[in-house]
Image: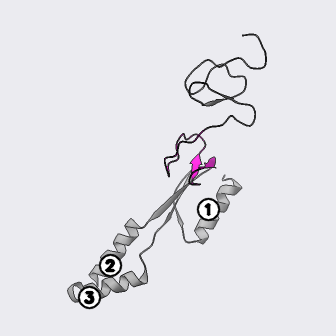
Amino acid sequence: MRSNRLQREIDDLVSRGWTIEEETPDRVVMVDREFGSVLSHVLVAVLTVWFSMGLGNVVWGAYNYVSNSRRRVLWEDAVGCPHCGADVPASADYCPACGDDLERVPEPNGGIACPECDAVAAEGSRYCPACGTRLAETGGGPS
């Protein structure tokens, strides 16, 4: 079952001509293909009609269909990249669209940032789930 946010994004893209290329439980790959502008086809047709009777126009359309395809991956648990705004899975360390390093901040429910790798561990954890570093005791309990 998709979240309301994800379903709204899918519906919005479908209404603008995008199609669903691939679906998994946690992501949807959307694709928008185009054949090129009318002006580019007219230009190619004029330049090639004497040689191939329009075959160049078909090749130009096929080239545009492949090379001008746009894809977007929509993640169920996505967060926005602070640099480019692309959807990024919550577990990613880098944005797949722009490569920006995604700084992880402590969880709003009181998670602890690891002093070695800055991964976020749940409150009360004694070891970092990413690198295994022993975390300082919290809450004033015995060490």
Q: CA distance from mark 1 to mark 3?
A: 41 Å
In this rendering, which labeled residue sits more in front, label 2 or label 3? 3
Q: Is residue 26 visible?
A: no
Quadrant hosting residue 6? bottom right
Number of the label disc, if any, that sits on residue 49:
3
Nearer-the-camera pick, 62 or 136? 136
Q: CA distance from mark 2 to mark 1?
A: 31 Å
Q: Which residues are drawn in magenta?
A: 76-103
Residue at x 40% of width, y 84% of height = 39
Tag 3, which secondary structure? Answer: helix
Which residue is identified by label 2?
Answer: 58
* Residue 50: percent from left, percent from top: 22, 89
Q: CA distance from mark 2 to mark 3?
A: 11 Å
Quadrant hosting residue 140? top right
Q: Is residue 118 above or below residue 6?
A: above
Q: Horizontal placement of 124 versus 14: left or right?
A: right
Tag 1, which secondary structure? Answer: helix
Q: Name the amino acid, label 1.
A: Ile
Q: Name the amino acid, label 2.
A: Val
Which residue is identified by label 1?
Answer: 10
Q: Point out the residue furthest to the right here.
A: 140
Q: Horizontal placement of 39 versus 116: left or right?
A: left
Q: Name the amino acid, label 3.
A: Val
Q: Is residue 56 above or below residue 98?
A: below
Nearer-the-camera pick, 86 or 56? 86
Q: Residues within 10 Å of mark 3 (few under 14, many from 20)?
A: few
Disc 1, disc 3: CB below 8 Å? no
* Residue 123: percent from left, percent from top: 72, 26
Marked residue nearer the N-terminal end (1 or 3): 1
